[in-house]
Amino acid sequence: MPRRMWTTLGYVDEAGAARVTVSGDATVTGWNDGARRLLGYPPSEVVGRSAAALLAEPVDGVVERARAVRMRWRGTLAVRHRDGHRVKVALLAHRTGDGWLLVAPLPSDDTAAPSEATLLTWAYAQSPCPMAIYDTELRLRKVNAEMARVIGLPEGDLQGLRLADIAGKLRSEGLEALMRHVLRTGERRHMETYPRTGGEERDHAWSAHFAPLKTKDGQVHGVCLAAHDITEQYRARQRLLLLSEASVRIGSTLDITRTAQELAEVCVPRLADFVTVDLLDRLDQDEELPPGPLTGPIVLRRAAHQSVYEGAPEAAIELGKVDTYPEVSPMAECLVAGRPIIYAADDPVITAWTALKPARGAKLREFGIHSYMSVPIRARGTTLGVAVFIRHRRLGPFTQDDVLLAEEITTRAAVCVDNARRFTRERDTALSLQRSLLPQAVLRPSAVEVASRYLPAGPYTAAGGDWFDVIPLSGARVALVVGDVVGHGIQASATMGRLRTAVRTLADVDLPPDELLTHLDDLVIHLSAEAGDEETAGDVGATCLYAIYDPVTHHCAMAAAGHPAPAVVTPGGPVEFATLPVGPPLGVGGLPFEVMDLELPEDTVLALYTNGLLGGWDRDVDEGRVLLADALTRPAASLEGTCDAVLRALLPEHGVLDDVALLLARTHALDAAHVATWDVPADPACVARSRRDVTERLTDWGLDDAVFTTELVVSELVTNAIRHALPPIQLRLIHDHSLICEVSDASNTAPHLRRARTFDEGGRGLLLVAQLSRRWGSRQTADGKTIWAEQPLPGAPPDLG
């Protein structure tokens, strides 16, 4: 009796097909009862023998050809029955490792089995796949039970109707167009659709297949529609697409509020109808947030919200406003629990919360809100806020799949928010440091009128190391400085502070521009060496422009270390960029810096700037120079107005890409009426004559009250020059905002103070000059040195600088 396998409905006859297993060397290893019925051999006579012995006629290379087949083979073979007659077998061979499974169907002898036509009728009527048949007029002729269930109408009510009659014109146009194509061409077509049918409460995704119903001569007499429910695959694909979009859109900037808004925008309407993002109110404070879940009540600030309706009318709190959320609220409960929570509109938490907040309860009823989902915003173990997802227009509550999706998106946003928070803190620290190192109030020396601007890069770039300075020098001269440290952040700001201090120190020594830059270059090399080992040395670098203007001679000496040349605007003349020999950037070392000397008429404007002013995403430096020249020549009421005009012309409204420092200086001149110069012979007897010359000039200037002090200063300085220096000797008196006395000689030996002993006859000259003057010093010149002393004018306020 054939073996049968019992099931819940009866049994399945395993002998309904002949099954034989064959090894790789063509040896029979298995023989079922169906094979016995087909060929008459019992297993004992076949298993272990060569399968080739069963063939009714030889087949050349059958083993080799079988080995060449990879997966499956089908064909017809003639085999020999046990009683000797030939049997034609339709064979299907499956590859199994290094062997084969051979299967051949057996003719059925069950006379009680349903006919093929009956089976086809049952298959159509009872198929789990919704099916429908339309005639050439696209009228519905027949539907199976599953299609009637999906549509929500019995078959009798549907016959003769078109899709537009059943589903509405707009929703059926695409399907009918596809069916017309099938009727016209006889080709099969496929499409995916996402409708809500009349017989179902939720939207479903369908894969619809359209096949022509043809006669044997190829004429089309109808269309068969078969639909497959692909809702789960569709939703999984949509979740992946939403995650992909979130990874691209969220975190496009280092701005906390913008990142929160991107989170809300990504999720509406594909996940929720209304999304709110509330962050901790102390998020922007300069303190570390506590790790782990929070405890209620919780103070949150509305950072973002987004709705399917314009203007987000569901919002009960405005953007930027702070609200306190009690423990019975979806925001606080999920933050305390530290996990996402789904709520229905009638959940006790929602009921209690809306009772405490009537405005929110009114919104719930007005928009028909039926489902909430609260998800904590956490990054690196720290809670930053909460995102609440709400549905009112979209049917169906949130599911666990929605929770996983929301968690994934929110986690991405949380990392971006935390990065933005950390960046903002570091940038604010760097900006505070940089602003504290920049001049708090630019000095206004008599030699020039100045105006300045400093704009940090941003808002999404760390502060850089740009700086400028105005340094008064001896002899009514002034030094103008602008520089740019490579890089951004606290390190760049700190380096900028060290370089600015070094420049001021070297300027106080009264070094010429090229020597000052050489010393500054050495300093940057040392700073670079301190920054790390040989592999990281050179990470510290800077550019600098240093200029000295003398209002007496109208000359300006300048040198540059890798810095853009200044713009020069002479009165009534065009804007020219100085042809300055630009030396290497600071930190390169071993290369010289060159000085260029310009004669500047009075009221000439010098524009010193960093490269952030000229460059940009949409223009090169040459275009920036053209814009700068145009802005400098526009009429302005003041130098401050010119500064504003330059920034408006060259910088975008949404923020600069790099730090910008701008220093404008309009030159003034000291005419001969304010300067007196005398050549002094190298004879001690001429000291008295020098005192008389000074007295006469002070009287002419109306400075009689300064005569006594100035005579003493002149007497000591001239006497020292005659005794200890080389001729020629020159005395100069400058009447500016202060009274400056200078004595120049041909000696390079620098003077120094010393304390004279009680019985010494000399050695007190410079000490006396220091006590009588507000400040004094010496500077090297091309022909020797100059010793100077500065006194306040009689009646002038005390110098607090």
Image (tube, rainbow, N blue to C red):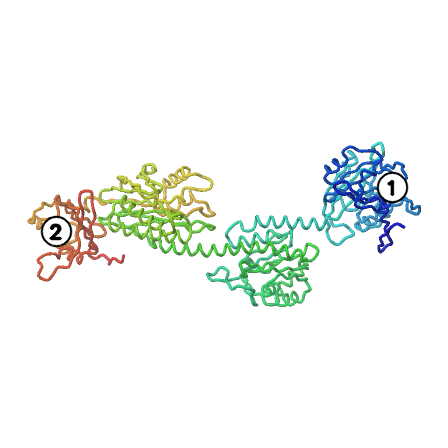
In this picture, residue 586 sits left or right of residue 232: left
Please, what is the three-letter code of the amino acid marked with disc 1? Leu
Neighbor class of circle 2 (other Cα within 10 Å; few <14, some 14-19, many 20+) is: some
Task: State the mark number for residue 720.
Answer: 2
Q: What residue type is labelled 2?
A: Asn
Q: Quadrant of residue 319?
A: bottom right
The x, y position of residue 602, in whole percent, is 27, 42
Residue 173 shows up from this direction: no
On the question of residue 229 being in view, the answer is yes
Disc 1: CA contacts within 10 A as few (<14), some (14-19) or many (>=20): some
Query: What quarter of the picture does the C terminus occupy?
Result: bottom left
Per the image, the residue denoted by label 1 is 39
Q: Position of residue 47 (x, y in %)?
A: 81, 45
Judge from the rendering whether residue 756 lies leftward or rightward of residue 661; answer left or right.
left
Lower sequence index among marks 2 and 1:
1
Please indicate whether residue 645 sits to the left or right of residue 505 in the image: right
